[in-house]
Image (spheres, rainbow, N blue to C red):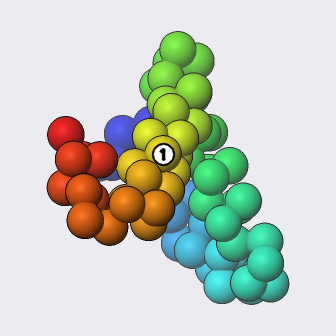
Amino acid sequence: MQFNSYSYLILLPVAVALFWALPVSLRRGYVLLLSVLFYASWTTMYAPLPFIVCGGVFVCAREMMTRPARAGRALK
C-alpha cells in the first residue's frame, strides 16, 4: 500500500477513528500492529522492521537513562 493510493486514503481515517475509540492502555499495541501490517503490505520481508526499530530505540533510551552524562554516545 502506498501513501498516495486510494486504499490508504480510505483506511487512514478508519484507523485513526479506531485509535481514538480504543482505551488508552491498548493504543500502543494497536499502533504497533498497524505498523507491522502496513510494512507487510509492501512485502513480508519488511514485517520485522518495526520491531527492530522499537528494540533499537529501547536500547538507546535505556542507555541514556542509566548514564545521563554519556547520553550522546548511545545515539552513535
Q: Is residue 67 left or right of residue 41?
A: left
Label 1 neighbour load within 10 Å: few <14, some 14-19, many 20+ = few
Q: Is residue 24 left or right of residue 68?
A: right
Residue 26 on image: x %, y %: 78, 71
Q: Is residue 37 visible?
A: yes
Q: Is residue 6 visible?
A: no
Q: Quadrant of residue 70?
A: bottom left
Q: Amino acid at mark 1?
A: Val
Q: Quadrant of residue 23?
A: bottom right
Q: In terms of secondary structure, where does tag 1 sit? A: helix
In the displayed structure, 25 sits above or below 75; it is: below
In the displayed structure, 33 sits above or below 53; it is: below
Kindly identify the residue that appears in the image at 68 percent across and 49 percent down: 33
Residue identified by numbered label 1? 59
Question: Foreground residue, 13 or 68?
Answer: 68
Q: Is residue 72 left or right of residue 28?
A: left
Residue 60 on image: x %, y %: 40, 49
Residue 9 on image: x %, y %: 43, 59
Question: Foreground residue, 53 or 67?
Answer: 67
Quadrant location of the C terminus in the rendered image: top left
Question: Foreground residue, 75 or 32?
Answer: 75
Residue 8 on image: x %, y %: 45, 52
Kindly identify the residue that appears in the image at 44 percent across and 66 percent down: 65
In the displayed structure, 3 sits above or below 47; it is: below
In the displayed structure, 69 sits above or below 24; it is: above
